[in-house]
Image (tube, rainbow, N blue to C red):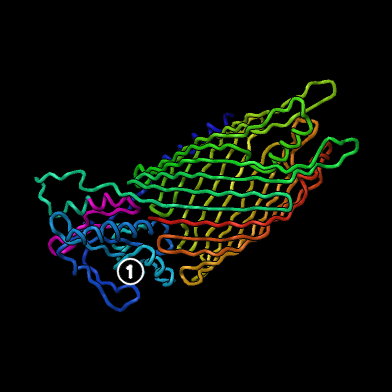
Amino acid sequence: MRPVIPRLLASVVLFVGLVALSAQAPVSVPSFQLKKFGSNETVSLDQFGDGVVVLDFFAYWCVPCRRVSTELEEHVQQYYSGKNGNPAGKSVQVLSLNIEQGRAARTRQYIRQTGASLVLDDIDGEVYKSLGGRGIPYVIVLEKQGGSWAVLYAHAGYEGVEKIRQVIDSVGVAEEVPRSESAVSLLTAHALEVGAEGLWADDILLTDTTATHVYTMGKTEFRTSYSFSTLELDYDPAEELFVNWREPANVSEKRHTLQETVRHTLTPSWTLNGSLGGYDGFQDYRSLWLNEFYRQEYPVGYEEAKPRGFNLGAGLRWEYAPTTAFAQVDYAWQTDTIAPGYEKKPFVPLARGRSELDTHTVSLTLENILTPTLRSQAIGFVTDTTGRELRYGGQGSLNWALAENWVLRSTVGYSEEAPRFEAWFVEETLETDIDGRWFFSLTGRWYEDTGEIDDSLLLSSAAPELETWHVGVGLRWQGENSALKLSGGPYFTRYGALGPYTEPFQNLYRGRDWGIVQLAFSHQF
């Protein structure tokens, strides 16, 4: 690995090593009275003066809030209702406080999906601000002491429902009575995600099916994915003068991929990520096409290709501003056994190209909620691959809520590698909320590069400059625990002029009109 990568790692570690600020709430607070969401009926905090009250501040645009509101309703509100209170018999009530007064339809959808049973409107976030709110989700546990409410716990972000229940269970319990640490069990959850994709042209058919199981146990999430892919193409060799040994062929291969990702919450602000995985089979149709070319071109000396690979990765995520700003650094190592190229020069034995590649990648990701309607993400990376110069790149994304039912997602990206490779892309997706459950989207994507860096073979198989564009439409259904999306559209690839000694590859690098269709399903249980 070149010195630049250790230097980048050191810089990132220094960056994420800064100390984050945390929200502070007053020791005690006066009572308040708020209207129920969508109603003129009011609810007073003093109505619950004999028990414990959990305040859950949220807004429909806050993605982390969805998990918090769902777990507080199921594992706090319903849990203690079923037990008639905490161990000391104190009643427990969760109040979900909505701090976003615009776009009532989105808030109703949020309430339906999370199951929040008692939602109050905190107009202009007055209660939120009075309690030291500086980010959401923001959870506070209150108990009536004397004439005012005492703050037993306050945290911007989320430490898990186990922590909330520990605080609640301590209310009204004599200090001399020992409490079992096992009173709060680790919560578990499962989710299933299934996706299928097909991409085809007149001579190529590619399919990919992926199943992912997500298992959450306490502060740790395990994500296991298996993919089965097929590659099928009609190999059509170029016609050249005095070349008669190349023959058309139908070539097909299968690829299996297994990936495991683990995410563990170390503290409310720090999350550790790890991954490992591997695959067996050709990664793309281009490699399969070239392998068939070399198999026919050099029958004496050709060795059957057995592409496969293995990867390891680790990352650290830092919430440097409560619930609104995140930084993540990742390192990944990939080793690949590829289908190599071959070179035959006059009076020299057949030479087999490099078949082993190692790739090291370091990336830095910054995510920020800039306003209630605007979110941003910026990614920068550097990649070091065997036998090549360093590749640098990055991309930026914006999610912008244009109106009550419209969201625009914009992404731009760029990468470069010496001595003369550059690539750019732009993608735009516009999605509209039809009725809170059905969503329609329109996507456009454009990509261009200057062509692969030439290899050392007499017959250069490096791709020339490339331009692609794609237009797609999508329809998504969102239920309380399930989601289904179908999308598709045309996809076009156009290559530039081939360079010298590349005539045999003109049928590989020709313009194609593709069709693409994608189906995705997810369910939480």
SS at mark 1 in the image? loop
Answer with left or right where residue 72 lies relative to residue 245.
left
Residue 3, image x and y in percent?
57, 29
Judged left or right of residue 320, residue 376 is right
Vertical order, 146 against 457 (above or below):
below
Residue denoted by label 1: 122
Give the crowd class for mark 1: few <14, some 14-19, many >=20 residues within 10 Å: many
Which quadrant would the C terminus be assigned to in this image? Answer: bottom left
Q: In the image shown, does 441 or 10 lie closer to the viewer?
A: 441
Vertical relation: 194 (above or below) 247:
below
Q: Is residue 74 above or below residue 383?
A: below
Question: Quarter of the image holding residue 27?
Answer: bottom left
To which quarter of the image does residue 291 belong?
Answer: top right
Q: Looking at this rendering, what residue extends furthest in the right direction?
A: 241
The stretch of residues the image draws in magenta is 140-165
Q: Is residue 149 magenta?
A: yes
The percent position of residue 292, horizontal first and vertical second, equals 73, 37
Q: Is residue 134 magenta?
A: no
Q: Quadrant of residue 384?
A: top right
Q: Which amino acid lies under the numbered mark 1 shown in the image of this protein?
A: Asp
Any part of residue 190 in sight: yes
Residue 436 location in percent, x, y? Answer: 46, 69
Q: Which quadrant of the figure contains the N terminus?
A: top right
